[in-house]
Amino acid sequence: MSSNANKTTVAGGSPMRPLPKMIFASRWLQLPLYLGLIIAQGVYVMHFLVELLHLVEAAFGSSTALEALVTSIGYKTQAPITTLNETVIMLVVLALIDVVMISNLLIMVIVGGYETFVSRMDLRDHPDQPEWLSHVNASVLKVKLAMSIIGISSIHLLKTFINAENYTDKVLIAQTAIHITFLLSAIAIAYTDKIMMSAASNNKH
């Protein structure tokens, strides 16, 4: 039995006209975009493993790995860094968490976007189906993406504050303002979605 996404008939049972059928099939043009995001996900995994390896090597006294870590996190101090200190560890761990959160964002866009805009994945009885995917739609996906962006922005802001001595006041204020803007945008999106759901519920009654 074919899925709803692959049916070529309209509700009355008659075949779809050529032009609507072609327009409907054009959703598959998004497939290369999602495949590209999967490749980007692989790049993030490689970056995570490299940073983790440098952290482990630095913990065992590798000066080369320590230098690579300090360069990657942009940490600067007046005194030379010869050993792995708490600040460097914290910044590296936050950078790793940042990679994980961006990876989670990619998964939501890939899986949720494909399910919502391209084709059903038929995961209803799959034991590993994500909980959020069972009720995903464009509005839910939009809210979840906004919340993920806030989380990523929070990690970046925390990294900046920990390493605040290497940033100007203008940069600190700008990053804080951007984070607040993301937060207000997410609240606005969630509130708008709530209004739309309430209106739809009232129309049903």
Image (cartoon, rainbow, N blue to C red):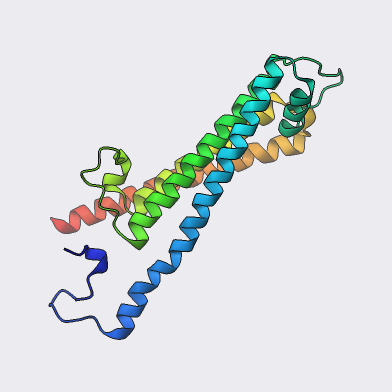
Residue 92 x %, y %: 65, 26
Residue 167 image offset from top left, x and y in percent: 77, 33
Give the residue drawn at x 52%, y 45%. 41
Residue 63 pos. (x, y %): 79, 20
Residue drawn at (31%, 49%), measured in percent from left and top?
A: 136
Q: Nearer the viewer, residue 117 or 61?
A: 61
| Image quarter of residue 7 | bottom left
Q: Could you tell whether 182 is left or right of 92 in the image?
A: left
Q: Which percent across, then down, holds residue 65?
A: 74, 25
Residue 4 visible: yes
- Residue name at image x 75 percent, y 23 percent: 66
Residue 124, compared with residue 71, is above or below; it is below
Residue 85 falls in image quadrant: top right
Q: Along the line of sight, which residue is nearer the eye, 38 or 79?
A: 38
Residue occupying the point 79% across, 34% down = 168
Question: Which quadrant, please, contains the C terminus?
Answer: bottom left
Compare residues 20 and 82 and report the one nearer the observer. 82
- Mark yes or no: residue 158 visible: no
Left or right of 176, for residue 148: left
Q: How many marks?
A: 0
Locate residue 159 relative to residue 144 in the image: left or right.
right
Image quarter (top left, top right, bottom left or bottom right) of the N terminus: bottom left
